[in-house]
Image (cartoon, helix red, strand yellow):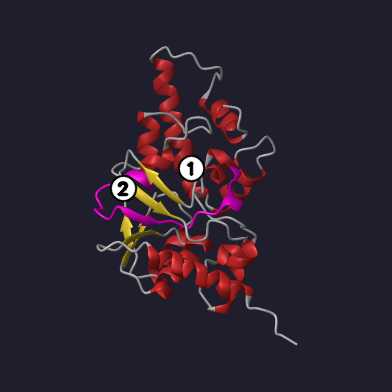
Amino acid sequence: MTENPDTLGLIVQEAVKFIQSHEPPEGYFVAFSGGKDSIVTLELVRLAGVKHQSFYSCGGIDPPEVVRFIRKHYREVRFLYPKQSFFTLIKKKFPPLRSRRWCCDHLRKYPSRAIPLKHRIMGIRIEESADRGDRPRIDRNVREKTVIYKPIFLWKEWMIWELIERYRLPYPSLYDEGWDRIGCVICPWICTPNMALVNRNRDRWPGLYRAFEHAVTEWFEARKSQGAHLKEQTAEEYIQNWYRGIA
């Protein structure tokens, strides 16, 4: 009678070989966010024994618990910062919308442009977003002149948590407090008519939301004074509509 194969072991072995087989001479750029997927991705890179440097684009609206977690457990990760804060950009541009989400570029992508490492490993999984299924496991960003490698592209969530448990990897406490995904505290993707996720985040991190509402109010009043046509009559009405995803 044969023993059951170590499914996770085989999956890990495949991911490690994938990373090793594409190792560039200068080493990889490893994107790190402090979330479960990036924790596993960085561990796979370590297991592969390849040359790499890890980077965290600190957008300024991340959960403070995650920032502290990275500083404590991943001291080798280099912090990258945007040229302008999220709140300053709101006043210069507009509050980000689902259809016009400029924040990801300015807070996450652009800060890494100065890093010369063009072969980049990211903890992207299809299961996290159906739209990602249209892209290949090895992707190219022509504009940024980078090659993107996705070792855990086809992984399921159970695989992520099983590896974390097996290797006893630390992870942010927010996962144990009900957060299934960790990202920006303020994001148009969490805005819905019932405001459930907005209210949860606003109760947890009120300071960030006060700063957001102040920036939006300044933007709104400036636009009104310039004669812009906005359906809302007041900044407060606009903010409430934004939270409900109907701004």
Q: Is residue 38 magenta?
A: no
Q: Amino acid at mark 2?
A: Pro
Q: Work out which residue is located at the far right of the displayed protein and give it.
A: 1
**Along the horizontal axis of the image, is 168 left or right of 114?**
right
User: Which quadrant is the C terminus positioned in?
Assistant: top right
Q: Amino acid at mark 1?
A: Arg
Which residue is rendered at x = 48% and y = 42% of the image?
Answer: 210
Which residue is rendered at x = 70% and y = 80% of the image?
Answer: 4
Quarter of the rendering containing residue 176: bottom right
* As drawn, 51 above or below 195: below
- Camera-side residue of 242 and 160: 160
Q: Report helix, strand or loop for mark 2.
A: helix
Q: Which residue is mark 2?
A: 111
- Camera-side residue of 91 and 119: 119
Mark closer to the observer (1, 2) = 2
Q: Are marks 1 and 2 in contact (CB under 8 Å)?
A: no
Q: Is residue 115 magenta?
A: yes
The magenta-colored residue range is 108-130
Q: Alpha-carbon neighbours of circle 2 within 10 Å: few (<14), some, or many (≥20)?
A: some
